[in-house]
Amino acid sequence: MVTTTNSLLAGKPQALELEQILKPGITRASMRGLVYGGPGVIELKDIPIPEILKPTDAVVKILKTTICGTDLGILHGKTPSVLPGTTLGHEGVGVVDEVGSAITKFKKGDHVIISCITSCGTCEYCKKQMYSHCEHGGWILGNTINGTQAEYARIPHADNSLYAIPAGADEEALVMLSDILPTGHEIGVINGCVKPGDTIAIVGAGPVGMSALLTAQFYSPAKIYMIDVDQNRLDLARKFGATHTINSSEEDAVRRIIFETKDGVDVAIEAVGIPDTFDICQNIVRPGGHLANIGVHGKPINLQIQNLWIRNITITMGLVNTNTTPMLLKTVESGKLQPAQLITHRFKLEDILDAYKVFGNASKENAMKVIIAP
């Protein structure tokens, strides 16, 4: 359950960025932002509007943002790198309000998608398109610097970390391109080597699992199993293209898949991040198959290597790089990919604490993705 408070945890240090420190004698307008106060504590409060700190920065006025399962993990104390005082959020679309002197691709007034991954574009990892491991960025928004669940956000390395929104595009839907769609596509579908004719299984019908479901269809798998304990989400998965659904709270998912296939699935995609769902994946993947782990695990799992090695199984995992975001944007423009169908709830920024409660009780609230706007 999401716990909120009207004040930050007493005695805890605050991770204030330089733009939050006012110089003596200077008064600056404030904005509203969701501030992390330590495990179980978040507060919507007045905070300083960010400013340009480096020539490669941009300040973006947030038009739409959302909540990620990772944000819930932060709230539950699973991410110690996030210090009290940090504004949460790493997804959103907005309009450029100010740019640093080195910015060449964007100008004030441009509408943009904010990538969850910040990339300098020049370091060793960026040159390999491993933007998640950028030596000067990576996942920093709402983690080690202030994020997007506010009226404005400072975006470092903006030329490489923002994407221009085409005129007339559904900007609300494009929030899904900040994180979940490239995550499902890159870490689940591409790493899992989904190919035409495959039988695949996605364990977890949450936002990232649904993103894997939507993007897997680019590659024409013959069968797509969706496995979850929430029947409402399974029904939604059918509408999104799943050919088979299994409610693992009512039947043995492993037994059914082994019975209905020759010897398991070609690709098993784990999209929850708990030992039980990883166990399902390693028990249903066939010889020569791929197990692609998307879920963020907070505790060790039991790797059945004694069974997997002889079956020539490939196991992959990772943090999204967002290198496929431009391609995904083109598929949205063409109508091939329709991420708006993932949105179930909408809130004003002033009601973001209610949004956290709804998203944190997704099964009860029939929530998938929530949109938050000023």
Image: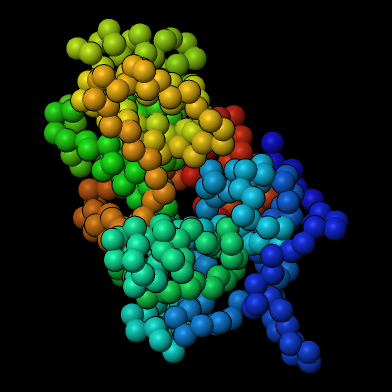
Quarter of the image that includes the C terminus: bottom right
Q: Position of residue 328 (x, y in %)?
A: 28, 54
Quarter of the image that includes the N terminus: top right
Q: Taking the image as drawn, is residue 35 in sight? A: no
Q: Taking the image as drawn, is residue 109 in sight? A: yes
Going by the image, does 152 lie left or right of 209? Answer: right
- What residue appears at the point 52 percent right and 67 percent down from the top-left corner? 62
Q: Position of residue 76 (x, y in %)?
A: 66, 42
- What residue appears at the point 34 percent right and 58 percent down from the top-left corner? 130
- What residue appears at the point 34 percent right and 84 percent down from the top-left corner? 104
Q: Position of residue 142 (x, y in %)?
A: 57, 59
Question: Which of the 4 quarters of the picture holds residue 112?
Answer: bottom left
- What residue appears at the point 31 percent right and 45 percent down from the top-left corner? 185
Figure disc tally? 0
In the displayed structure, would residue 7 be above or below residue 191?
Answer: below
Question: Which of the 4 quarters of the picture holds residue 211?
Answer: top left
Going by the image, does 211 lie left or right of 141? Answer: left
- In the image shown, does 146 or 96 lie closer to the viewer? 146
- In the image shown, does 290 or 336 lie closer to the viewer? 290
Most extreme residue toward the bottom is 25
- In the image shown, does 200 or 151 lie closer to the viewer? 200
In the displayed structure, would residue 262 be above or below residue 195?
Answer: above
Identify the colour scheme used: rainbow
